[in-house]
Image: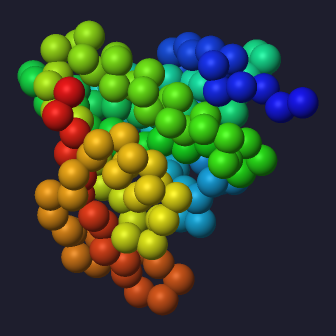
């Protein structure tokens, strides 16, 4: 029997969690963030949250908040737990966190080819607001990023 998305718990990621974060990042992305990028996020005071299932981290989200705007910098769920609504629950939790910090809009960028993420964001009410041409590295050149916003 699989766990329900409601059984997720959340906790703030600390610098000492970086090896676990990097292990998840490398499982999820062909072009993962580096340790330096994560350290920079921690040093900047960005909010980084683990999603845990029965005490084991299965994903995370990283947010930046400035005044009344927030940006979702990174979100992922380990491949073995994808397709079980955990990303939706994590994203809902992250939206609650940025609301609590006083943000009224959440922005994000996503690879144009990331159909699962696009479906989630559209289902959650995000609206496409633009395109960044050739933004992401890809196996053959570069890939566009689609920019989205959600009014909180």
- Which residue is more in the foreground, 142 or 124? 124
Left or right: 50, with 104 as reference point:
right
Instruction: Single out the residue that lies furthest toward the right.
Output: 1
Q: What percent of the width, then of the height, locates residue 43?
A: 36, 26
User: Total of numbered circles in the picture?
Assistant: 0
Q: Residue at x 27, y 64 (%)?
A: 146
Residue 55, position as x, y percentages in the image: 76, 16
Depicted 104 relative to depicted 126: above or below: above
Quadrant where the N terminus sits is top right
Q: Is residue 152 left or right of residue 141?
A: left
In front of the other: 59 or 126:
126
Q: Residue at x 52, y 29 (%)?
A: 89
**Quarter of the figure that contains the C terminus:** top left
Q: Nearer the viewer, residue 125 or 38?
A: 125
The residue at 37%/70% (across/down) is: 112
Q: Is residue 131 visible?
A: yes
> Whole-percent x and y of residue 132?
21, 69
Q: Is residue 36 visible?
A: no
- The answer to which image quadrant residue 59 occupies is top right
Residue 18 sits in which quadrant? top right
Residue 123 position (above or below residue 69): below
65 sits left or right of 23 in the view: left
Kindly identify the residue that appears in the image at 37 percent across and 81 percent down.
142
In the image, farthest residue toward the bottom: 140
Relative height, residue 103 to residue 81 (above, below): above
From the viewer's perspective, is residue 70 above or below residue 148?
above
Q: Position of residue 94 (x, y in %)?
A: 40, 25
Outermost residue on the top side: it is 100
């Amino acid at each position: 029997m699989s766990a329900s998305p409601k059984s997720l718990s959340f906790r703030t990621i600390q610098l000492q969690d970086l090896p676990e974060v990097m292990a998840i990042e490398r499982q999820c992305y062909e072009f993962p963030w580096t340790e330096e990028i994560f350290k920079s996020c921690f040093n900047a005071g960005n909010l980084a949250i683990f999603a845990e299932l029965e005490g084991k981290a299965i994903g995370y989200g990283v947010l930046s908040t400035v005044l009344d705007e927030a940006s979702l910098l990174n979100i992922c769920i380990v491949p073995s737990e994808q397709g079980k609504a955990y990303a939706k629950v994590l994203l809902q939790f992250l939206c609650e966190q940025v609301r609590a910090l006083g943000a009224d809009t959440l922005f994000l960028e996503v690879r144009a080819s990331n159909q699962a993420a696009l479906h989630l964001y559209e289902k959650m009410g995000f609206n496409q607001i633009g395109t960044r041409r050739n933004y992401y590295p890809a196996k053959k050149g570069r890939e566009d990023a689609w920019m989205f916003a959600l009014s909180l």
